[in-house]
Amino acid sequence: MATQMSINPQGAKKDILLSLAIIFVPNLILTAVLLGLVFHYQVPQTHSELPSVPDPLAREPSAYLVDFSATKLLTVASWTSTLSSLLPSFAMALVSFPVARKIANASKNKRTDDLPTPYQLSMLLGILSGSVGSLWAWFKYRNWKKRELVNDTAKKTITWLVFVSLLGYLIVIADTWLHISTSTIIHSQTSQSQSAVSTFGRGLNVSESQCFIDDGPVAPCSVAIGNHGPHFINPVEAYQALTNTSNQNSIVPFTYEGKSYALIADTNIPPEVGYQAQSFAVNTQCTFLSEECTSMYDGPWGGPWHCSDNFLGFLPNWNYSGNYSLNPSWAMAGVQFFQDSGLTQNFSNIGGSGKPGVSLFGQDQFTPANPVYIGAWGLILGYGFSTGTTSPLLNYTDFILPETPGLGFILGCNMTAYDLNYVWYNGSVLVQQMVLSNTSLVRILTAPFVTELANLLPLGQTAIGQATPSAFLDTWATGFSSMALALSSGIMSPRASVKEQTAISMLVARIPKAPLAVLVFLTLLYACVGILLACMAAQGGTGEAKIVQGYLSVAGLAAKCFENEDRYEAPVREVEELFAEKEMGARDQRCSKVSLVASRRGGWKYELMERDGMGNAVLIDELGSKTPWTHTRQV
């Protein structure tokens, strides 16, 4: 026994430290790299500088948003699963040290119940090599009808292999889960405010005292009245804004507290820009007066309507014979402005025009009020009962059905103008403050209608396509608000934005927390298992246990079978010294080789074979006698 103790005692420590390092260090490094990438490149939380705009979501309760390639992150994660498939052999190398000590103690104390049978030894060597396939041999062994009991040492060894293998498979599953659930998404962040803000706000570019054309009559700034009649100030911009073709002004409808509004904004707003600015907004609300204003007429409706003594008129109701051209738009659709909701008090009856509220030579008729009340009428020609063209609106008493094919309506409305402080964000209007504008703005907005420059027929033609009276009212009212702003846009100029920010869109990796946490936990658990096994190996893995551990291997078993006793039982420092091949160091194929030959009993057996001095193959028996291969085949 003293001879055997001369084996290198430092070999056990080196083997234990090497196996521990292979298990622990890569798992720790890969976990640190993965977590370092996730947290180092985690998308920072930015804050919106615009009121009422939520901060962009950079923190999710169930995932990390990482400004790093998802493919590269998953590559790092996949290394952990690749590594886990290589570690069972090193883990079982650590297990082999306490197993060797138990077998050595059982051999010295002659406890045969704690020693394996030859077949159990073959399976045990497979287990200690970390081969998962060797578990199948143990499973089949349990089904033998006649077999020896499996001792505790073998059971614990099997349990360790099952545990480390299962832990490796769980790491693969967690890595697969992480791969499947990780995605690349578009994330928006806000940048810092720009030093030079844009001019997305709007305001009047002239004062009311400048509303003169030569020595002509006074009029609001949106129109001028010359000797030959009224005309727009900057008509090109007015009509371009009306038709949504302007490169400067845009009319934007929006809803606030259940009401529809229109505001004038800039046309060239980049989609990634959000801002706070001041502008003008208009709200118009209407109800039907058609039935109320025509109820005094008996029989078929003949064309006249009467809502009040100051709001009355006549819709064309001719028999169409193909020779008439109904062109004067104001006779077909128009508005009048009043000071009260009953539409009884207009703003002027002077001027000799013969039309209440439309005098062009006085100033008070230009609606100095906010809100202002509106009486509106219209007749949409060509709207009949032809088969296949019947509209749902024909079934409502809110509309007038004249003899001329068409659909008429009379509305009572109110229009309110506001000075608007708003935020534009992601294509939406967020109202910050809305206060009534002064009456001069209303005079400007209504001037194109007072002077009958506006054509109101398109409003009714657009609204008549709706399916219900309420939808008709909403469409007509919103259209009127937009028209009022558009026709006065020629005298409005840009104003500097109050605040401005830019949304930066970028592709980020969305890493779910659950699979990442599971993967990190299992990887670190594997590293901790390596530390535990190393401690167990260190407790019983030096001295005599190291010798047994070296022999408790396929190499030790091969040396026992094919090397002579003097070499096999001699003291060595390393297991490979048990083999004569290490000393010979020859490369001329003169070492003994292991062969499988047919036995005399009909089976097969291992034999050592080498070449003699003549180059002929000879077999070497257990006593070292050499028999020519040809002679053996003849026996």
Image (tube, rainbow, N blue to C red):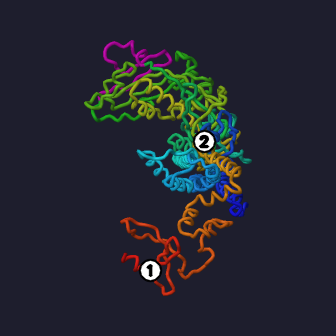
> Looking at this view, is 443 or 585 the one in front?
585
Question: Eyeballing the image, is 250 above or below 91?
Answer: above
The residue that mark 1 highlights is 628
**Span shown in magenta:** 290-319
Q: Name the residue at 57% across, 39% down.
A: 427
Question: Eyeballing the image, is 25 above or below 426?
Answer: below
**Residue type for callout 1:** Pro
Q: Name the residue at 43% across, 29% down.
A: 331
Marks 2 and 1, how far apart in space? 71 Å
> Looking at this view, is 41 or 189 the one in front?
41
Quarter of the image for residue 405 reads: top left
Instruction: Name the spot of residue 117 as percent of width and height, x first.
Output: 51, 52
Is residue 309 toward the left or the right of residue 372 in the image? left
> Looking at this view, is 433 or 111 the one in front?
111
Instruction: Name the spot of residue 100 as percent of width and height, x first.
Output: 63, 53
Residue 346 seen from this side: yes
- Extreme left residue here? 387
